[in-house]
Image (cartoon, rainbow, N blue to C red):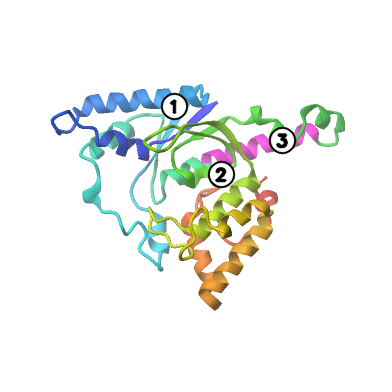
Amino acid sequence: MISLIDLDPLVYQYGYLQLPDGRPFPARMAARMLDEKCEDIRLKSGGDTWIGHVSGAGNFRVGLATIRKYKGTRSESERPPLYGYLRGHLMQKSNVVVANDEEADDTLSIAQYKDYAAAKSRYNSYIEDDPIEEQQLGSFEECQWMLNTVICTIDKDLDMVPGLHYRWSKGNVKEITTWYQSVDGGLIAFYKQCLTGDSVDNIPGLRGVGPKSTHVTKLDSLEPDAALDYVKQRYTEWYGNYGDEFLLEVGRLLWMRSEVGELWNFPEDLDSNLF
């Protein structure tokens, strides 16, 4: 099992470490603590090894955003004192992937989609024209042991990615031990985000619609196709003839890539296309 670790939030977490008198933590000590945290995440997520992902230069979303400036509420001056040192430390590691012109979330997602598709292919080859084998194995959801990756992050944006997930604790974020996300469950998580937007990244959703809104909770009772239709209807109510255009931009900003260079479109059947 490979633990795919989202390093971006860890760089911020350990980049802000301070001594009791308010001075920044010694850089090498902070780097060692970050390394130890990665090992702790690997152990708790059940990984034999870990591969870290960190965002590099450029981001295709900046050019896509026309409604609001992508991450327009952030500035480089808000970066922690040890930000540069810790990123440089990580980028020297052979087991760290640097995401250029996209985000670490995208490369994490691509890696897990690839593993999920490979596992699904193996499963299908076992049960093809063999009802006895299918009966013994059960459904693919019962064969999670075929998966070889687990995404480790505190970012709920990656909940849309099928496969295994682990969330470590930080502040008000509670630890969630390794859990499984289905393709349908991932799509519902994505469509919920399309309704709420993402205030951290300055991505708009529908005004006044939060995570506990009835518009959002209604999606729990719908299949993915019906959920997308429902979201499109709500966007049409809010934005009129521009509803689909607004939703397409928001969806492309929120979607975690399943393959290199992908841009989200209104899918008819994601599961059949990928798996």
Main SS of the magenta part reads: helix
For disc 2, the marked residue is 161
Q: Residue at x 41, y 56 (%)?
A: 60
Q: Compare marks 2 and 3 and give the one earlier in the sequence.
A: 3
| Amino acid type of the residue that numbered disc 2 sits on in the rendered structure | Val
User: In the image, which disc is placed on residue 41?
Assistant: 1
Q: CA distance from mark 3 to mark 1?
A: 26 Å
User: Residue 192, percent across and down?
Assistant: 55, 55
Foreground residue, 174 or 193?
174
Number of residue marks: 3
Question: What kind of element bears circle 3?
Answer: helix
* Figure check: 12 above or below 202: above
Mark 3: amino acid: Phe
Question: What are the residue bounds of the magenta stretch?
Answer: 111-127
Q: What number is the disc on residue 108?
A: none
Q: Secondary structure at mark 1?
A: helix
Label 1 crowd (10 A; few <14 / some 14-19 / many >=20): many
Please say whether residue 66 is visible from this viewpoint: yes
Residue at image location 48% in from the left, 57% down from the top: 210
Location of residue 245 in the rendering, given as x and y in whole percent from the top left corner = 52, 70
Q: Is residue 236 left or right of residue 207?
A: right
Which residue, given by chain and number where applicable, does mark 3 sit on? Answer: 140
Where residue 134 appears, x then y in whole percent?
A: 81, 32
**Residue 84, relative to residue 243: is it above or below?**
above
Q: Is residue 268 visible?
A: no
